[in-house]
Amino acid sequence: MPTVGVVKLVVQIKLLPSPEQAAALEATLRACNRAATYVSTIAFERGVKDRNGLQKLLYTDVKATFGLSAQPAVRVVKKVVDAYSTLAAQAKAGFLGKTTSKRYRKAMGGPVSFRPEAAQPFDDRCLSWQTDARTVSIWTVDGRMRGVRYTGAADQLKVLAEYRKGESDLVQRGGKWFLIATCEIPEPEVSEPVDWIGVDRGIVNLATTSDSTNYQGRGLARYRNWCARKRAELQKKQTRSATRRLARRTKKEQRHATHINHRISKEIVSVAQRTGRGVAVEVLDGIRERVRLRRDQRGTLSSWPFHQLGQHLAYKARQAGVAFLEVDAAYTSQRCPRCGHTEKANRPDRDHFFCRRCGLAGPADVVAGVNVRDRARSAWAFVTMPVPALA
């Protein structure tokens, strides 16, 4: 099947270092982040935030002061430049609030700092992979360290061996060591769909398809409510240990939601690929600004992983050669897919749909999924319509 591009994925593998190797990795991570904080301070004070200017200014100093060799010093400078570029992009997009807000002033009013255990990128000059032996050779402040063993899931190891390309990030999390590698997988040509699977996303039901497959969010909601109670308990203590536990719990909750989204999206795309159909979802951009909620609902909507589920569906569909579309979300839960009648009263409550004109009744989320599917049919027909030749 011909390829039209690549899909970029990250593969996380777990390192299995000896105590001596782990000590060298920790010393390396801390040295790199001390150097990054130093470079960031100088960059902020002098207003030099481009890569060439910053490298020319601090390259020799960073090597001599922090014991870094040539290529790690270059990666540290690039890490700082990327951090300021990301910060500028966030400010421009309004993610930091208004320029007069406390959050904006705090973010833009001082240099970017790096945690001692923050991830550090390594390129192929600093890190080499021996995929047959499942070991890596990595630069450290104690010299080149060879034969560091690693492990991972079988499918991830296969992707790593075949498609790894570019940088890999060294990460320490909970006393364990990981390498997060970038892989570029050939993207197959998108096949012409015979039909579509419409996916309606929500809170009570995380996803409902036009085939009436329902992925309930009740279990995730209970878990997140439990986590919210635990967060409140830790916040009341206001101790340093409570703050550390709070950060670990937040990351664990995010990983749990991500795992669920991966599982749901994988199953939907697998069904679409097996049946020769495409996947369609609603465009939910700006949903937080459009809807009005009670105070007790705001936290749920703000923290719910709507967008992430859509992202997972999009890249898994691309990877599988399945067509993917985003369609207008307006009135998908109020429109009758049989007669087209649209009215708020068609949905008397959250779970049920009943058309006031033709009497069509069914689960509200399934009806919304069917409307998404129908809109994808129309949109795809328009996209693939041949352009008439000019006379």
Image (cartoon, rainbow, N blue to C red):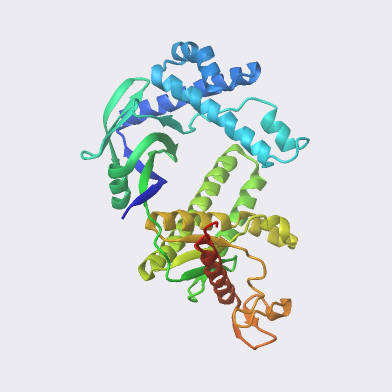
Residue occupying the far front of the picture: 391
- Total tally of numbered discs in the picture: 0
Judging depth in this view, the residue of 358 and 154 nearest the camera is 358
Q: Which residue is drawn at 42% across and 15% down?
A: 67
Judging depth in this view, the residue of 296 and 226 nearest the camera is 296
Quadrant where the C terminus sits is: bottom right
Determine if residue 383 is in view. Answer: yes
Q: Quadrant of residue 332?
A: bottom right
Q: In which quarter of the image is residue 278?
A: bottom left
Say above or below: 263 vs 90.
Answer: below
Say above or below: 303 vs 141.
Answer: below
Judging depth in this view, the residue of 177 and 207 nearest the camera is 207
Say above or below: 164 vs 329.
Answer: above
Determine if residue 216 is in view. Answer: no
Q: Residue at x 50, y 50 (%)?
A: 252
Residue occupying the far bottom of the picture: 359
Q: Which residue is drawn at 78% across and 35% down?
A: 100
Give residue 40's position: percent from left, percent from top: 57, 22
Q: In this view, does 93 lie to the left or right of 273?
A: right
Judging depth in this view, the residue of 242 and 324 nearest the camera is 324
